[in-house]
Image (cartoon, rainbow, N blue to C red):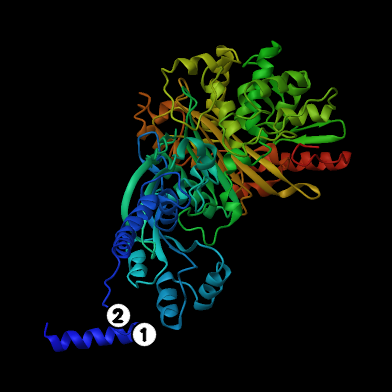
Amino acid sequence: MTPGLKSKLTSGTARRSGKPGAQLVGIPRWRFVVVVFCLGLLPLAALWQITRLQVLPDVDHGFRFLKKQGDARMVRTEEIPAYRGVITDRRGEPLAVSTPVVSICADPQVFQLTEANLAPLARLLDVQEQALEKRVAAYADKEFMYLSRRMTPNGAEAVLALGLPGIFKKTEYKRYYPAGEVTAQLVGFTNIDDDGQEGMELAFDNWLAGHPGARQVLKDRKRRVIKNLQLIRSEKPGKNLALSIDLRLQYSAYRELKAAISRFHAASGSVVTLDVQTGEILAMVNQPSYNPNDRRRLDTAAMRNRAVIDLIEPGSVMKPLTMVAALESGKFSPDTVINTSPGYYRVGRKTFYDHRNYGALDMTGILKKSSQVGTTKIAMELEPEAIRGVFERVGLGRSPGTGFPGEAPGLLPNKQRWRPVERATLAFGYGIAVTPLQLAQAYGVLANNGVKTPVSLLKVSSEDDELAAISESVISADIAADIREMLKAVIEKGGTGTRAAISGYEVSGKTGTSHKVGAGGYQQDRYVSLFAGMVPADAPRLVTVVVINDPRSKEYFGGLVAAPVFARVTADALRFLNIPPAVRSDEELGVDAVSAHSDTGESDTGKPDAGELDTGEPEMEKSEIERSAKIRDLAAATKPPRARGGAT
């Protein structure tokens, strides 16, 4: 430094200090050390704070708190839907299956409807714009809502392609029913959440429904899955359910029933086909029906499984069971002759009529002609408890035990004192109420040599030890065989059920035509037409019951309306099950399985007038018509009040 510069600095310092001649003083060392220490401490303090927040566990608002807050915003637990069990027929044909679908969801806190996205979104969701706006507004304070349920994958992808914030998808399952209306009332259906609502879907909901799984995922603010973090639990699919029905036979029965309902302008109908050996229900169809895959215009009346729920007065189809009581009493045998002349019979103040004067008939003839007079005379010789006891033993008046929702137990009165007319009407199926399934079970006892086997809607095995354990003999095998032999005559020429004949097979069965009950009692022009039968007659394998409710055509007798349905349905069943025909020809069997236009009139109607000849029966001889007219004149002269269909 030059002497001049040094002198200037010294003078300047002296001036700043205010002291002439003061010397230049340096920064104290301690101050320097303090400053350096503080500067070095700042990163250490920052590192300590970071350590507290990210590492140490027991610090308020530490890493656990921060992680929880982050997870609350980004980590979600998603449900993994479980596959619902498949419902199949006895051969494995699917009746109800679940297919994957996509539901479109939204977070109303993120998603915003604008004029730009409202129209395209409503179009893809197939909803009105105003309806969409109202729906989104209703969920404005929520964090989740469905925009559309069960869309096809392609449709859902089109919605997601709009790229709208807050819209995301959810995978679900939708139930599909391949057989549609053919099995609708039996299988039932599920709701939008895949819970059983009707039929077997409801009855076995816990069995069919699986247990959903769960997984933890990382999502962005648009609800899109960024990463699968962990599997919390795996989903457990539901168990499959094999029903007893054979879908081939189900289709056949449905086709024939639907055709008969249309032809005879009937209100409804049911067909039940039963395997005699196992009690399995091979077919159960109803009309009207509905399509479970499209329930937008669903008629609730069509949802009812009428074969299990609806009650009917069975009428003459109960006469074979009355004959069982007669044979068990020891007072009658199959050869016992009953005089039915003059064609009507008075019990108290009621008069019961045959279709015509049949004269002397043995018990087989009474069933063959469905004689009301003959049945009534037999009933008056029996205790009503004896007839009722037979009805009860074969399953009437109690639930069949299939587990089907709404299964009806029927109505079988138990009275301490029976009036004479009640004893008569009980014998031919009035004053009681049964379902078609109960009727099939009752005829199954006759077909199975008096052994009652529980009916089942689930597939069972004839070798099942439990099946043998719960079966019980309720009727003598000899008596059951006698009744089957007597019922053959109903199908033969001159019987009321000739149209139930099946080429190559012997059939045992019974027709029935009962009056419907209205507001004022029994209606004289409203009927229920029935046929119940079994085949092959000597060693039955199948029982089929046909019920046609309220046919409005000129033909209404069970032998004309229900018997042909029985013949066609049962013939298909015999073919499907490979049951061989009898060796004897149709001529040797005593039936005409082609025309079968024999006497189809039944005295359940209680009206022996010639007007019933319009039902397709052969023409009466003139003398027979005159005899019927004399019977009517005689009845009118005595002026007894007529029993409406033989019932009180």
Question: Residue at position x 68%, y 40% from top?
Answer: 514
Assign a secondary structure to mark 1: loop
> Residue 361, can we see it?
no
> Left or right: 353 with respect to 181?
right
Disc number for residue 275: none
Instruction: Pick the residue in front: 218 or 186.
Output: 218
Residue at the spot of label 1: 18
Q: Which of the 4 image quarters holds residue 391?
A: top right
Residue 7 position, x and y percent, is 19, 87
Residues packed near mark 2 inside 10 Å, few (<14), some (14 to 19) or many (20 plus): some
Question: Residue at position x 83%, y 27% from top?
Answer: 420
Q: Which of the 4 image quarters holds residue 252?
A: top left
Q: What residue type is labelled 2?
A: Ala
Residue 643 position, x and y percent, is 80, 39
Residue at the spot of label 2: 22
> Residue 379, can we see it?
yes
> Left or right: 505 with respect to 304?
left
Q: Which of the 4 image quarters holds residue 598?
A: top right
Residue 555 position, x and y percent, is 59, 49
Residue 267 position, x and y percent, is 61, 52
Assign a secondary structure to mark 2: loop
Give the quadrant of the C terminus: top right
Q: Which amino acid does label 1 sit on?
A: Gly
- Give yes or no for contact between labels 1 and 2 (Cβ–Cβ under 8 Å): yes
Question: Residue at position x 59%, y 43% from top?
Answer: 306
Residues packed near mark 1 inside 10 Å, few (<14), some (14 to 19) or many (20 plus): few
Question: Residue at position x 36%, y 85% from top?
Answer: 18
> Left or right: 280 with respect to 604?
left
Cα–Cα span, label 1 and label 2:
8 Å
Instruction: Pick the residue in front: 222 or 547.
Output: 222
